[in-house]
């Protein structure tokens, strides 16, 4: 299995790690945008050294609970970091829902568009198709500000699968080639702990489809619920969830803590292959 990311073919015969690079203003310094971007670039380089095959660069426009960010501000945050991380050789993903940001990020050298709205905003499908980038379409019930208030499903696995396959068909209809499409159940996006548990247990229903499955479980609030720990103390729980997801067939694991995640997955793969 592989994912074609513009000129780069991402080999998914074994699971890979996508390192998270947040580009947000540093509240502890007034160094300005240049230093915020510089800090994010340093962090991204470190994650590649730790074994990340992809870097996911986010300007925080669509994160749950995040303040909305204007197109201009998101461009100012994301574009310099894409440019600064191209030379690492990693696949550069941009976490955005805005068509303008997709176009500018692709022009700056991004390889993948990671959209938590699943390319549903006006113009997003067209921008993604024209960019030549790979896309990751994610399931979210509701919108970031309110999605955790009262999430409801009949059967969460069936509904998430139907949604994702519909989005894949929309991508195909917009001209995105099949080999450039990945899917993501969107853990934590309009889901209770019970919904997330059902989705993880039933993840093989998604990975049985032809599309590579990406999962984001790192430090998420379900771990806060299970462990009673703040985000900075959820590494071991995150590793447990990453291993469970890979055993169910996930191929791309989005993570904050790249070195430990790479070791955990390397160990699983080695032992599954007989040592
Ligand atoms: C606050 C709450 C800040 C949650 C950030 C988050 C995913 C993603 C995110 C995911 C894909 C986080 C999330 N999660 N993209 N972006 N899949 N494809 O925990 O699960 O990083 S933002």
Image (cartoon, rainbow, N blue to C red):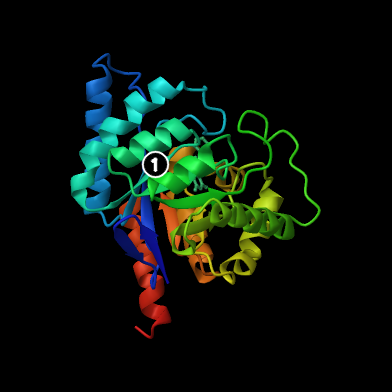
Is residue 40 shown to the viewer in this render?
no
Is residue 84 depicted above or below 11 in this figure?
above
Circle 1 residue: 94
Name of the residue lying farthest toward the left: 87
Number of dots carrying numbers: 1
Q: Residue at position x 40%, y 21% from top?
A: 72
Mark 1 crowdedness (10 Å alpha carbons): few <14, some 14-19, many ≥20: many
Residue 261 is situated, as x and y percent measured from the top left of the image, at 37, 58
Q: Residue at position x 59%, y 69% from top?
A: 209
- Quarter holding the N terminus is bottom left
Is residue 73 shown to the viewer in this render?
yes
Q: Residue at position x 55%, y 43% from top?
A: 119
Residue 163 is situated, as x and y percent measured from the top left of the image, at 67, 53
User: In the image, is 149 to the left or to the right of 253?
Assistant: right
Give the quadrant of residue 232: top left
Is residue 261 depicted above or below 150 in this figure?
below
User: In the image, is 100 to the left or to the right of 147?
Assistant: left
């Amino acid at each position: 299995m592989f994912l074609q990311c513009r000129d780069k073919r991402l080999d998914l015969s074994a699971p890979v790690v996508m390192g998270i690079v947040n580009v947000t203003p540093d509240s502890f310094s007034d160094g300005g945008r240049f230093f915020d971007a510089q800090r994010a670039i340093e962090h991204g380089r470190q994650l590649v050294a730790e074994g990340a095959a992809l870097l996911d660069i986010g300007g925080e426009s669509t994160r749950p609970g995040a303040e909305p960010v204007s197109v201009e501000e998101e461009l100012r945050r994301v574009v310099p970091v894409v440019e600064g991380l191209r030379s690492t050789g990693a696949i550069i993903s941009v976490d955005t829902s805005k068509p303008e940001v997709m176009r500018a990020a692709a022009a700056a050298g991004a390889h993948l568009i990671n959209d938590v709205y699943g390319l549903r905003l006006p113009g997003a499908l067209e921008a993604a198709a024209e960019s030549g980038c790979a896309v990751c379409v994610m399931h979210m019930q509701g919108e970031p500000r309110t999605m955790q208030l009262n999430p409801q499903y009949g059967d969460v696995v069936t509904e998430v699968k139907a949604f994702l396959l519909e989005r894949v068909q929309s991508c195909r209809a917009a001209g995105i080639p099949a080999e450039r499409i990945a899917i993501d159940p969107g853990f934590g996006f309009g889901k209770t702990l019970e919904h997330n548990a059902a989705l993880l247990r039933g993840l093989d229903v998604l990975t049985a489809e032809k599309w590579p499955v990406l999962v984001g479980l790192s430090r998420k609030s379900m771990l806060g619920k299970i462990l009673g720990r703040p985000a900075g103390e959820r590494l071991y729980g995150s590793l447990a969830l990453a291993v469970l997801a890979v055993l169910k067939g996930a191929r791309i694991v989005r993570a904050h803590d790249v070195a430990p995640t790479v070791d955990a997955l390397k160990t699983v793969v080695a032992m599954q292959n007989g040592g």
